Amino acid sequence: MQNEEVFVTLERHEQKLKSIQKQLDELKAVQKEIKVMNESLIEITNEIKHTNKSLLSCEMKINELQSAPGRKWEKIIVSVISSALCGILGYVLARFFG
């Protein structure tokens, strides 16, 4: 009877080992998937960083383009005021010396 009990115990251990091996194989597959996903996340993160740099560059260019008309008007106003002052000064000097 003792031999039979050993045989049964051994059989249970073999079944348990097979079950553990199957679980281990499944974990290895999951580990590979996680590794691939991690690599993909790193790649996506790098692409997002690059995209953010490009967006920042575009934003700076857009801001520059938006402010350009304002600078043109400032230059026009300065030119008009300078021309008017020069004209008035010329007129005053012509009256004074003329």
Image (spheres, rainbow, N blue to C red):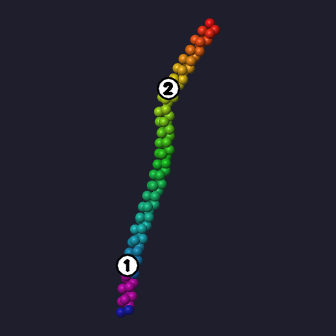
Can you say which quadrant of the picture contains the N terminus?
bottom left
Residue 47 in the image, given as x and y percentages of width and height: 47, 49
Q: Is residue 7 magenta?
A: yes
* Nearer to us in this view, 39 or 94: 94
User: Which quarter of the figure has residue 88?
Assistant: top right
Residue 15: mark in rendering: 1
Q: Is residue 11 above or below residue 79?
A: below
Q: How many numbered marks appear? A: 2
Residue at the top extreme, as displayed: 98
Element at label 1 = helix
The structure residue drawn at horizontal position 50% and vertical position 44%, both measured from the top left corner, is 53
* Nearer to us in this view, 55 or 17: 55
Q: Amino acid at mark 2?
A: Trp
Residue 52 in the image, given as x and y percentages of width and height: 48, 45
Q: CA distance from mark 1 to mark 2?
A: 87 Å
Q: Is residue 60 magenta?
A: no
Can you say which quadrant of the picture contains the C terminus?
top right
Which comes sooner in the sequence, label 1 or label 2? Answer: 1
Q: Is residue 16 above or below residue 51?
A: below
The residue singled out by tag 2 in the image is 73
Taking the image as shown, residue 40 lies to the left or right of residue 91, namely left
Residue 33: mark in rendering: none
User: Which quarter of the figure has residue 15?
Assistant: bottom left
Report the span colored magenta: 3-12
* Nearer to us in this view, 88 or 78: 88
Mark 1 crowd level (few <14, some 14–19, many ≥20, 10 Å Cα): few
Residue 63 in the image, given as x and y percentages of width and height: 48, 36
The structure residue drawn at horizontal position 43% and vertical position 61%, both measured from the top left corner, is 34
